[in-house]
Image: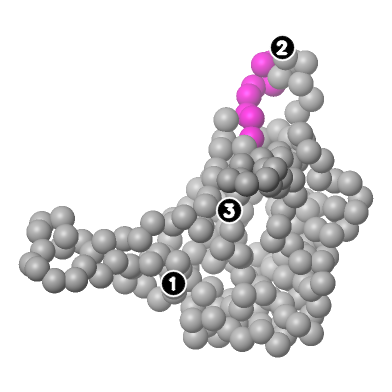
Amino acid sequence: MAVGAENMSRTPQIAPPEIRWGQRMGPIVFRDCLSPLGHPGYPPEAVNAGKTALDYGIGREEQDEWAYRSQMRYQEAKKAGKFKIGEELVAVEVPQKKGPPLMFSEDAFPKPDTTLERLGKLKTIYDSSTVTPGNAPGLDTGASALLIMSGEKAKEFVLKPLAKIIATASVCTDPTMIAINPGLAIKKVLSKAGMAAEEIDLLRSMKPLPPSHW
C-alpha cells in the first residue's frame, strides 16, 4: 500500500531548538510552519516557486492560465461522472455534538466559478513575484491510497490493474529549487525507462516544456 495523508489545519507549532537544552525564564516563541510555508532558514516556498518559474520563462499569466485550466478540467470530469464514491473517492462521516453527522463525499477545494479575470486580480503572497492564492496549492486536508502488487498476484485475486509501473526515480535538490524537482524526476525516470517525453500522452496533452528547458 502506498498511502499519503495531510491535515494542514492541524499542523503543529514548532518550539525553538534551544528549548531542548533548557531555557531561562521568559516567554517561549513558537513558529507557525504554515506562515509562511517553507523550510527554516530559507525564503518562503511561494518566493522560491515564483523565482524558479521566472528563471524558466514561466510568468504570472501562464501560471494563472494553468490554474484556470486545472479548475475547469476538474469540473468537466465531475460532470462526466469520473469521481465515484468507492472508486476514486471515499466518503468521510464527521460526527457532530448536535444533529446528524456531516458527510464529506467530494473535494471541497475546486471552485467552479473561477475565471481568468478573477485570478489575474489576486495579489501575490509573501512578496512572491508570481504566486497567488489562486495559482498555488491550497492549505487542505486529504488522503489517498494506492494498492501495488505483482502481475501474478493481480491475476490470483482477479483484479484489473489501472496501470503498470515500468520505472521509478527520485531526486533531491536545494530546498529553494523544489519547484523543478518533478521535472528532474520525470527526466530521470524517462531515461531509466528508455523513453522520451513525446511518447507520454498525458504530458503531451499538457504542453510540457521542451527538454532544453529542464
* Residue designated by label 1: 35
Res. 151 image quadrant? top right
Q: How far apart are marks 1 and 3 (CA)?
A: 17 Å
Rendered position, 165 above or below 140: above
Instruction: Specify the amino acid type for callout 2.
Output: Glu
Res. 173 image quadrant? bottom left
* Residue designated by label 3: 141
- Tell me which segment is drawn in magenta: 146-153
- Helix, strand or loop for disc 1: loop
Task: List x then y, in percent, for residue 27.
Answer: 19, 71
* Residue designated by label 2: 156
Q: Which of marks 2 and 1 is nearer the N terminus?
A: 1
- Taking the magenta stretch, the answer to whether it contains residue 204 is no
Determine crowd level at label 2: few under 14, some 14-19, many 20+ residues with C-alpha closer than 10 A.
Answer: few
Q: Nearer the viewer, residue 68 or 169?
A: 68
Rendered position, 159 above or below 125: above
